[in-house]
Each structure stands twice: as C-alpha cells, then as structure tokens.
Image (cartoon, rainbow, N blue to C red):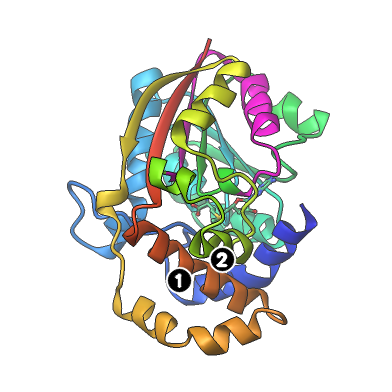
Amino acid sequence: MSNVRDYYDANTWKWLVSGTAGALHRELWGPGTSDRNDAVHYVHRRVLDRVTELCPSGRARVVDFGCGVGAGAVYLAEHIAADVHGISLSPRQVAHAERRARQRQSALAGTCRFYEADFCRLPWPVVERVAGADLVYAIESFVHADSASAFFDQVAQVLRPGGLLVLVDDVLTSSGVQADGHPAIAEFQTGWQVGSLLSAPRAVELAAASGLALVSRTSLSGYMRLGRPRDRVVTALQPVLRHGQRYSHWCRSLVGGDALQRCHRAGLLDYDELVLVRT
Ligand SMILES: C[S@@+](CC[C@H](N)C(=O)[O-])C[C@H]1O[C@@H](n2cnc3c(N)ncnc32)[C@H](O)[C@@H]1O
C-alpha cells in the first residue's frame, strides 16, 4: 500500500492546481449539470440523494472510503446534518481535508473528521469511531484496494444492517475480461496503481461473500467526457511521459490516465455505480 500512499502524497497538489474543485475524480456531465462545478459534484449529489432517502432527517453517519482531500465529505456536511468520516492512506490528503473542513466550518450543517488509515485494514480506534454507519461511499478508490475481499469485509464491519455502500469506479466489461493482459489495461493498472480491477459481476460476487447484496447497478460511462483538449495534449506527449514514468509519479499517472481513456473508447472498461445493502 505504500506505493499508493506515495503516489497520492506526490501527486495531490498537482491535481489541485489543475483545478478540480478539490475533487480527485472525473467530471460527470449527468442530468442537471451545466458547468464544471456541477459535473465535479454530480457523483456527490447521487450519494447525497441516497443518504437523504435512507435518513430523511439528514442525521446520518457516513464514511468516505478513500476521501481524497475531503471534497465529497465537505459537500455532504454542507448539505445535511450528517457526521461524515473520511479515510485516506495519504497523510497529505488528510491534512488538506482537515484544512478544507476548517475553512468551510461556518457553512457546515454537519461535521467532518478525517483519518489516515488503510481502508482494507482499519485500526480499531477508527472502526470504533465509524461503526454503525448508515452509508459508506467509495469514489474511484476501490480500484486501489490490494484485496477486494478485505475492502468489502471492512465496509460490512462498519455498516449497520440495512446500511448502504455506494461504490463508483472503473470495472471491466465482458470484452475487458476477455482481453485480460491487453496493453492498455496493463498500462492503466500500472500507471494508476490499480490493485482491484474486476468486472461488476465479480465485484458483486465478492461483496456478497462479505454480506453485501446488490441493490442497483448504473453505468455512468455516458456522462464522462473523453478526449478533452487537455487529454489530447497528454496523448501527444505520451512518448516523453512513458520515458519519464520510471522517475516520476506524475508521468506515471498521465500515462495511466491516457490508457484509461483508450480502454473506455475500446469498450474494455465501464464506469459504474454499484449500490449494495448490508444484509
Ligand atoms: C482517485 S482518489 C479519489 C478521492 C476522492 N474519492 C475523490 O473522489 O475526490 C483515490 C483515493 O483513495 C485513497 N485510497 C486508495 N487506497 C486506499 C487505501 N487502501 N486506504 C485508504 N485510502 C485509500 C487515496 O488515498 C485517495 O484519497
């Protein structure tokens, strides 16, 4: 896991400078989005809808597995009186997230707390703080898990019965499963430090073994924008970036991101939202 921590410790500030409203996931131009800010928060709004459906009073305990710099946690706490707990492997991200929550303190209806921990192996003091959660969400973080089963076991341990997991991530399509070892898939996995790239049915099967049953599966792929001008620049720079990736986490992430786009264009990957309930 130290490779994932180093990757995020090294790269986070560059993503923040490149202007993503503090979120470290892709923009989704779903229904109701009219600008980049909406597109960044589209996935947060989907999570928010689930929380308010589950706990109409808004008083909910929510856990963000792989919270980045706290964009999702702060967004939720701004909209509802929830206690939101964020977990990240990266100490730099945790420090950013805490600063972000402090700066928005006066706008928060709920509370935010952040922990530096491995979500596949949560230490007891963190489990104690977050146990009995109404909802856990994981946005573009599950793919980093070195063990999908350990990830689902930890989610099941902290969710109350009837609580929900909302997982949003890249999954292999059936063509992707058949194309095992495809160079673009391999490049994506290496570049983005991917440990758990599964098909959705396989993820659901492993989750079921941890006591999590599928509620819904929604493809969000159609809301992504591939081939934006900056993506085309990154594609043009691939020969240089491939050379640089031996020395730089940043080059590695740009090579991985370019490969991710090729995988989506070739129909090898889908970008899915899986909602599962703790039975
Ligand atoms: C692509 S970023 C997404 C961040 C955030 N969910 C967002 O959408 O802005 C992936 C996040 O997962 C976290 N992560 C990856 N593996 C982890 C692990 N084993 N334990 C805790 N956090 C992890 C990283 O530290 C990072 O915060």
| CB-based contact (under 8 Å), mark 2 and mark 1 | yes
Rendering coords of residue 269 (x, y %):
41, 50
Please state the horizontal and vertical placement of residue 62, each as a whole percent of the image.
53, 31
Query: In the rendered structure, does residue 168 fall within the stretch colored magenta?
Result: yes
Q: Residues within 10 Å of mark 1 (few under 14, many from 20)?
A: many
Picture coordinates of residue 142 (x, y %)?
57, 43
Question: Is residue 276 something that shows in the picture?
Answer: yes
Q: Which residue is mark 2?
A: 187
Q: Is disc 2 placed on a helix, strand or loop?
A: helix
* Horizontal relation, residue 148 to residue 61: left or right: right
Q: Residue at x 74, y 43 (%)?
A: 118
Magenta highlight on residue 23: no
Up/down of 115 relative to 253, above or below: above
Give 30 or 133, whichever is nearer the viewer: 30
Visible residue check, residue 57: no
Front-lying residue, 193 or 177? 177
71 left or right of 249?
left
Rendered view: 52 above or below 273: above
Determine crowd level at label 2: few under 14, some 14-19, many 20+ residues with C-alpha closer than 10 A.
Answer: many
Magenta segment boundaries in residue numbering = 144-172
Residue where numbered disc 1 is placed: 258
Kindly identify the amino acid type of the residue bearing the numbered disc 2. Answer: Glu
Q: CA distance from mark 2 to mark 1?
A: 9 Å
Answer above or below: position of 227 versus 65.
Answer: below
* Camera-side residue of 204 and 40: 204
